[in-house]
Amino acid sequence: MILHSIRFRLQIWHGLILLAVLTGFGAMAHRMAWDDELRAVDRELEQRAAMLFRPMGPRPGPPGERPPGGLMPPPPFARREGQARLIQSIEEASGGPYYFVFFDTDGSVLKSTAQEPIPMPETLAATRAHGPFPAMAGAARTRGTNRESYRVLPFGDMMLVGRSIAPELSEMRAFAFSLAAGGGALLVIGLVGGWVLASRAMRPIGAISATASRIAGGDLSQRIPAAQTEDELADLASVLNSTFERLEESFQRQARFTADASHELRTPVTVMLSQLQMSLARERSAAEYRETLLACQRAAQRMRKLAESLLALTRLEAGEEKIRHDRFELSQVAEESVELVRARADERGVALRCDLDPAECTGDADRVAQVVTNLLDNAIRYTPKGGEVRVATARNGRGAKLIVSDNGEGIPAEALPHVFERFYRADKARAITNGGGAGLGLAICQAIVQAHGGSIGVKSELGQGSEFTVTLPDQ
């Protein structure tokens, strides 16, 4: 559903944030504009009031009679004279948009040009109960659609000047509508732009999803187009492409392993079936039956050896095979392995040369001996009569190194990356093999070395021979 779409949720958050920003900006702009309008009206009202009245300072009274923070009450004749003058000024200025209200100290209205009763400002009402009025600067208030400015006069009475601010309110409503319209347009543009950007940002994810769907459908050769991804998604695409590549290689190895295992098992099974069918076709002598049983035994032993090798390899790769971590001398293990295969080397006319320097390491001596024996057996098998196989051991930093090399036919360059794979046989390398194994020996060697935390590698050239190097840690 669209509500569960990442693009839709991103758009919702983007829209809410943009709406909050535009609303805040519009409210701030409207408030600032309204404050400017009110300050302009207040200045206008203060100027109007100044035209009517020029302050008359109070006459000082006897010392000690001035109340703290207040003004001395003027003599009655001076106060009445000032009130009369102000009332006369109000009458002369009456008319126009302004109205004037003159409050006495007791809150009564002395003069008003307003067409409706004007309530006394709260400031004046609050100070009536506190005796003489304090000297005050001008103050202002908004009452309905009117703005009024007032001040306390030196005699304690109050003058108020006001006018309607309906034009300003209408102007501010128009300004608010303009802000809303502009904000709405920006919101629409922002949402459209956000949708476009979100669509572009999600496009590589769509490509990744489509590629993964095709791979899940069985097409393991598919890869994510790198040109459609950017920034962090480019790294993700690279990682996924590497994962897909390894997945494809794994499936290829699995398919090759299944085919090779089937082929290896089919040969001894075919031998057993053919021998049994021949024996059952007619009556045979005891010697012939014995020969048949021996052939079946050899085939069964071959199958058992293959099954044991596969089981050992699987357990090693799964980490289920227990590897001892004892101190042992690699040169001694290599020497014992050389003596074990010497008879086979002499039979094939291959010379064995040893250069065994002390090289102590940590691990399972029996498993390492299996590695050395397999490598020597392969070297002898692939070296023609009159050739030479060399074995060397030496220290390698904090570990030990074993090198098994020969001057045989070598391995083709295209086969080198695959020599440690299960059942792998390079045609050219195997062409000279007589009675070769199942193709699991090097795979088992690699699994054993890796279980020890070491590494194994090979270098070879056709016609020059091969060199296998094993490094084992000393820890």
Image (spheres, rainbow, N blue to C red):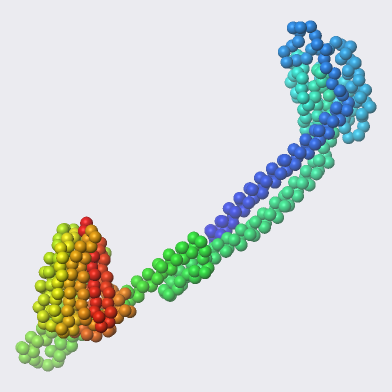
Residue 250 position by quadrant: bottom left
> In which quadrant is the N terminus drawn?
bottom right
Residue 296 position by quadrant: bottom left
For image coordinates 20% across by 77% down, the residue present is 406
Q: Is residue 152 left or right of residue 257?
A: right
Q: Is residue 215 above or below residue 54?
A: below
Q: Inspect this view and state whether residue 429 appears.
A: no
Please state the horizontal and vertical placement of residue 402, each as a whole percent of the image: 20, 68
Furthest toward the bottom, the residue is: 282
Q: Is residue 95 above or below residue 288?
A: above
Please state the horizontal and vertical placement of residue 265, each as a whole percent of the image: 22, 80
For image coordinates 17% across by 77% down, the residue present is 389
Residue sitting nearer the eye, 345 or 223: 345
For image coordinates 73% across by 43% down, the residue present is 30
> In which quadrant is the C terminus drawn?
bottom left
Q: Is residue 228 left or right of residue 294?
A: right
Please state the horizontal and vertical placement of residue 466, each as a whole percent of the image: 24, 77
Q: Is residue 463 left or right of residue 45?
A: left
Please state the horizontal and vertical placement of residue 227, each as a whole percent of the image: 52, 69
Give the total of numbered labels: 0
Residue sitting nearer the eye, 435 or 267: 435
Furthest toward the left, the residue is: 286
Q: Inspect this view and state whether residue 295 appears.
A: yes
For image coordinates 65% across by 56% down, the residue present is 190
